[in-house]
């Protein structure tokens, strides 16, 4: 059995093929096994050859079954790893999309913030401009009121004109000495300046049809004395018509 023992050891050395799955290595191993088997078959009995063949074949089968199982396990690991990688890649893509959306929101917010700041600055400038205009008109109106008071004083002394200050910086001009039958009978008109600083006439008692014309004329000429004179003449004419 010495020859058989040597043959089995030789096959054991040949099991180094477990280190590779390459088909060419398996083919080379089988060729080597055939060559050695043929060279040693003359020294062994048929039963020894048969037993040695079965043993070697079983060893090879066990080895390749083991490799096959290891290969399946490796494939499963690779598939699991690939699946895990796909899941991770999908998560990364989702995170990237989230990040891009957040970046877009930040940029949009920055844009809105800039536009809002510009709008606020425009409103501030407009408000400051309107405030300056309002202050200028207020100052101008005060000066005009002073002139009205001066003119009113003259008319009161000469024509029996009374001036009453109403709410909202409005002045009511009351004319008397118009009706010969009743010199104390009042004829009145309210005069004030609107937001644009223009003369505004309203509340004539009794009403005058020409009030709009007088208002337009005093805005053009700024001649307040002429306005009061015209109002008095119109009231006097109205009084004459009523006789």
Image: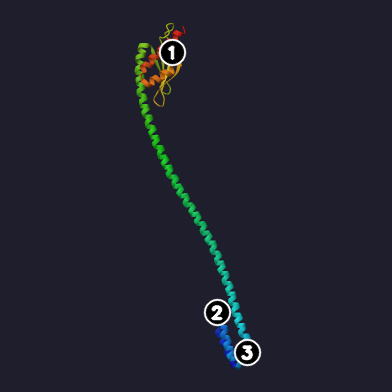
Nearer-N-terminus badge (1/2): 2
Mark 2 crowd level (few <14, some 14–19, many ≥20, 10 Å Cα): few
Residue 57, percent from left and from top: 61, 83
**Front position among marks 3 and 1:** 3
Nearer-N-terminus badge (2/3): 2
Question: Residue at coordinates 44% horizontally, 46% vertically from top-left?
Answer: 111
Q: Which mark is residue 24?
A: 2
Work out whether residue 236 or residue 169 is closer to the camera in this orientation and state it.
236
Nearer-N-terminus badge (3/1): 3
Residue under label 1, please give it. 187
Question: Residue at coordinates 36% horizontally, 16% vertically from top-left?
Answer: 226
Quarter where residue 119 is shown: top left
Q: Secondary structure at mark 3?
A: helix
Mark 1 crowd level (few <14, some 14–19, many ≥20, 10 Å Cα): many
Apparent side of residue 136 relative to residue 18 in the rendered image (left or right): left
Residue 113, percent from left and from top: 44, 45
Residue 159, percent from left and from top: 37, 11
């Amino acid at each position: 059995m010495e020859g058989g023992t040597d043959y089995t050891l030789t096959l054991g050395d040949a099991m180094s093929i477990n280190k590779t799955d390459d088909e060419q290595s398996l083919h080379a191993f089988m060729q080597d096994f055939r060559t050695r088997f043929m060279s040693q078959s003359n020294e062994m009995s048929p039963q020894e050859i048969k037993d040695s063949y079965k043993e070697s074949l079983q060893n090879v089968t066990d080895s390749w079954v083991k490799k096959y199982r290891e290969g399946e396990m490796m494939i499963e690991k690779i598939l699991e790893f690939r699946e895990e990688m796909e899941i991770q890649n999908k998560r990364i893509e989702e995170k990237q999309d989230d990040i891009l959306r957040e970046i877009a929101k930040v940029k949009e917010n920055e844009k809105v913030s800039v536009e809002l700041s510009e709008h606020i600055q425009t409103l501030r400038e407009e408000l400051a401009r309107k405030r300056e205009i309002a202050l200028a008109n207020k100052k101008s109106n005060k000066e005009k009121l002073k002139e009205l008071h001066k003119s009113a004083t003259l008319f009161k002394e000469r024509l029996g004109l009374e001036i009453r200050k109403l709410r909202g910086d409005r002045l009511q001009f009351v004319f008397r000495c118009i009706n010969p039958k009743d010199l104390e009978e009042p004829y009145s008109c309210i005069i004030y300046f609107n937001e644009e600083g223009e003369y505004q006439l309203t509340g004539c008692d009794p009403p005058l049809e020409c009030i709009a014309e007088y208002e337009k004329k005093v805005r053009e000429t700024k001649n307040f004395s002429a306005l009061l004179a015209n109002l008095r003449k119109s009231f006097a004419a109205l009084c004459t018509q009523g006789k």
